[in-house]
């Protein structure tokens, strides 16, 4: 429906109505329908409506008109000289549309407006028709481009070339990437400042030559592509960290670079096995992707050729040319989408596929982690995890075949190509990163890096993947049983000691009725507290136990549930200790009160002695179970949750707290013999012969118990340190 401004409308209303009509119309609206009737506003509106109509027709390429056409259709335009800005508007729109227009033609056709037209043209801020860009193939060593003397070629891609160059103004060597002046790579890289990402110094734009010069840190050690070539020419049994260093040194030699001397980094790499070397490289690249992800940047072209190596072997991610940053506006991510198909995740291939609805905006860091896992698998074995893609390009059939290979069961990966010394942690980390379902992969680069860290720490590796003959492989589901036994045995020994001590020093001195009531109260107290403690402690293990059983059956849990279970496991010991302390303290108070309420008179010093005896027994019940339960939890239970990822600062804080508590409980274990001896000083001399044997048993037993606690403490200390290294790295 055509919307008219109305005969009584002014020029402003006419312009607004005509603009709205163009916005909603499929076919050009009739300009004459919007002109006011009154002569004054009609003339002003006519010029503005012609400008709008010109702009819409030429920009949309819908039956473009010339001013002569408007004069012929609207004769009143010729009643007065055409405004110079209207003449210039037609010239500008035609030139913008790519037409062959010359200013001389307009000054000749409109002589009355020629002077003002020429002034407008001189002030024109539109760019002149661009010069032909310099073909990248015409660039080469020996040339000078802007501030850079090109020295030698470092590499090239479909849209850019990279040269080693000397920057004249700074007198330094840089790597210069020369490409067409388009894209948002400089904006993307400006957000990234990281040890494992190539540092970009700045960019230069050459508008006349339509070139962009991106100059960055020069990394001389080649790329992972050259390392991969070295791997394929080396027998699997001979691959090791030295293979990486040899590949780097070969590249340095070809470039005339001096091989670096020994350094801590090269020394570390030289001691690694090949799987450990791959994990060492992968950990750093995963951290780089995690940093990029936090900056809102996806790489989308992870492949061996885009990982540069320093002379020491440190990897650095490069070529974010097709990255899309959610923080950069202006261009669609599809405009920069690409990369090497052989390393793409299934969802990234689906973006390219012409018949699938996946969009570039649907991708996230997990897609980059998939590509990184493909690179690491290829480095590890010399071949890709799903075989080589023999059909190149983005042909629909090739994409269908590649998607089919990548969306199958992860168990069909070529695991038989993995080396025999590949740690289970590395195999597990790669297979999860290669899961066709993004929701089943590592959620962040930090999680992936943590799993690769396990491969580099022998003690952590032993904790997470114990040897086949280790008791830890079958003991984890029995957390509640182990906890109950670890508490029950020391508590039963403490109860026996307490009963014997109380009978010799207190009960035997009472009359028959008092003996019966005191014995009944003590036994009832022990039974009630023991049963109550057993029930509560088992209840504390339920969430961890059910989660362990679920994981064994293949169930998955969200990160929040796993974090709670890990916390429960680390806090289980202190909760048990708190329960024991409370129950022993309650028993020491309840028994004397119960005896007094029964009407039997017991000397006050007997009550005091009984309470002190309970404190000593409580120490026994606290110190020894603490180390037994902690050892079992850290060795057999907590490591089961680590392969599922998600460890963070909270885990580190809880592990640190467990380590600090261990020192206090070690001190408690050492003090038990001293407490026993101190308590003996309150015993009358005449009664000492009655308890000399229990005191000797206490002294010898607690000394042996301390030795056991100390050994467990040292084991815990090493285990906690290994687990904290994984969280910290």
Image (spheres, rainbow, N blue to C red):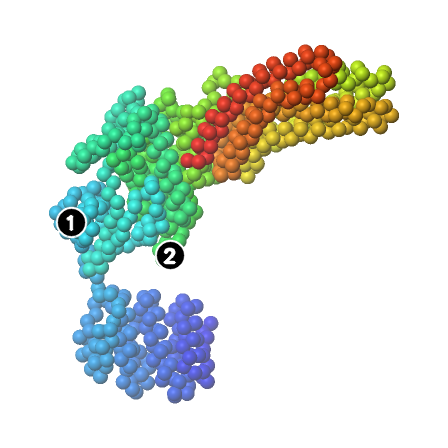
Q: Classify residue 457 by image quadrant.
A: top left
Q: Which residue is mark 2?
A: 329
Q: Position of residue 175 (x, y in %)?
A: 22, 45
Q: Residue at x 29, y 28 (%)?
A: 267
Residue 37, image quadrant: bottom left
Q: Please give the count of numbered marks on the rendered protein.
A: 2
Q: Is residue 117 above or below residue 668?
A: below
Labels 2 and 1 touching (C-beta < 8 A): no
Q: Quadrant of residue 486?
A: top right
Nearest the eye: 371 or 714: 714
Is 297 placed above or below 100 here? above
Q: Position of residue 502 (x, y in %)?
A: 74, 18
Chain-order first, disc 2 or disc 1: 1
Tell me what residue is drawn at x 38 percent, y 47 percent: 297
In the image, residue 726 lies at what x, y percent? 44, 32
In-front residue for pair 669/453: 669
Residue 729 visible in the snapshot:
yes
Q: Is residue 692 rendered to the left or right of residue 573?
A: right
Q: Residues within 10 Å of mark 2 (few under 14, many from 20)?
A: few
Mark sitting on residue 508: none
Disc 1: which residue: 149
Is residue 355 visible to the viewer in this orientation of the structure?
no
Quadrant of image for the C terminus: top left
């Amino acid at each position: 429906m055509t919307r008219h401004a109305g005969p009584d409308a002014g020029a402003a209303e006419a312009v607004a109505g005509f603009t709205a009509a163009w916005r909603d119309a499929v076919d050009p609206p009739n300009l004459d329908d919007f002109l006011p009737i009154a002569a004054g506003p009609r003339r002003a509106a006519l010029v503005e409506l012609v400008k709008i109509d010109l702009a819409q027709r030429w920009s949309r390429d819908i039956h473009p008109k010339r001013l002569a056409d408007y004069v012929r259709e609207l004769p009143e335009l010729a009643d007065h000289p055409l405004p110079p800005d209207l003449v210039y508007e037609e010239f500008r729109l035609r030139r913008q549309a790519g037409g062959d227009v010359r200013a001389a033609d307009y000054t000749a056709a409109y002589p009355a407006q020629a002077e003002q037209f020429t002034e407008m043209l001189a002030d024109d801020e539109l760019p002149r028709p661009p010069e032909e860009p310099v073909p990248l193939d015409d660039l080469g060593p020996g040339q000078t481009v802007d501030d850079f003397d090109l020295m030698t070629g470092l590499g090239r891609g479909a849209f850019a070339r990279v040269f080693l160059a000397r920057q004249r103004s700074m007198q330094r060597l840089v790597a210069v990437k020369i490409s067409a002046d388009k894209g948002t790579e400089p904006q993307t890289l400006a957000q990234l400042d990281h040890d494992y990402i190539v540092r970009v110094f700045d960019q230069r734009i050459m508008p006349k030559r339509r070139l962009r010069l991106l100059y960055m840190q020069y990394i001389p050690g080649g790329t992972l592509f050259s390392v991969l070539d070295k791997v394929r020419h080396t027998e699997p049994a001979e691959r090791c960290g030295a293979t990486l260093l040899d590949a780097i040194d070969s590249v340095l030699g070809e470039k005339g670079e001096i091989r670096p001397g020994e350094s801590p980094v090269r020394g570390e790499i030289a001691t690694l096995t090949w799987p450990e070397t791959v994990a060492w490289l992968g950990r750093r690249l995963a951290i780089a992707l995690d940093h990029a992800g936090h900056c809102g940047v996806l790489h989308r072209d992870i492949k061996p050729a885009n990982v540069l190596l320093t002379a020491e072997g440190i990897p650095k991610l490069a070529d974010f040319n097709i990255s899309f940053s959610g923080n950069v506006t202006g261009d669609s991510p599809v405009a920069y989408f690409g990369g090497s198909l052989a390393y793409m995740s299934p969802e990234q291939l689906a973006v390219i596929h012409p018949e699938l609805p996946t969009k570039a905006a649907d991708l996230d860091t997990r897609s980059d982690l998939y590509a990184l896992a493909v690179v690491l698998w290829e480095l590890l074995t010399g071949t890709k995890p799903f075989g080589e893609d023999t059909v190149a390009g983005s042909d629909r059939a090739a994409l269908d075949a590649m998607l089919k290979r990548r969306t199958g069961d992860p168990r069909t990966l070529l695991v038989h190509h993995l080396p025999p010394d590949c740690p289970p942690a590395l195999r597990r980390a790669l297979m999860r990163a290669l899961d066709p379902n993004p929701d089943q992969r590592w959620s962040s680069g930090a999680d992936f890096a943590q799993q690769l860290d396990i491969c580099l720490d022998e003690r952590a590796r032993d904790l997470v993947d114990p040897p086949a003959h280790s008791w830890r492989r079958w003991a984890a589901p029995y957390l509640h049983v182990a906890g109950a036994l670890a508490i029950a045995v020391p508590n039963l020994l403490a109860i026996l000691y307490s009963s014997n001590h109380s009978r010799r020093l207190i009960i035997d001195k009472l009359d028959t009725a008092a003996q019966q009531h005191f014995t009944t109260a003590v036994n009832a107290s022990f039974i009630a507290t023991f049963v109550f403690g057993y029930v509560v402690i088992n209840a504390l293990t339920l969430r961890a136990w059910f989660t362990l059983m679920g994981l064994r059956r293949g169930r998955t849990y969200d990160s929040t549930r796993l974090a709670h279970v890990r916390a429960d496991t680390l806090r289980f010991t202190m909760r048990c200790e708190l329960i024991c302390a409370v129950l022993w303290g309650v028993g020491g108070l309840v028994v004397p009160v119960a005896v007094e309420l029964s009407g039997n008179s017991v000397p006050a010093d007997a009550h005091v002695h009984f309470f002190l005896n309970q404190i000593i027994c409580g120490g026994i019940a606290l110190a020894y179970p603490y180390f037994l339960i902690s050892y079992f939890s850290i060795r057999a239970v907590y490591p089961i949750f680590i392969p599922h990822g998600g460890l963070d600062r909270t885990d580190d804080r809880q592990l640190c707290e467990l380590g600090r508590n261990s020192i206090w409980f070690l001190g408690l274990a050492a003090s038990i013999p001293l407490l026993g001896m101190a308590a003996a000083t309150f015993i009358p001399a005449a009664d000492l012969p009655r308890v000399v044997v229990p005191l000797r048993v206490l002294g010898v037993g607690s000394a042996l118990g301390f030795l056991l606690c100390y050994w467990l403490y040292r084991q815990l200390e090493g285990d906690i340190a290994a687990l904290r290294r994984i969280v910290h790295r």
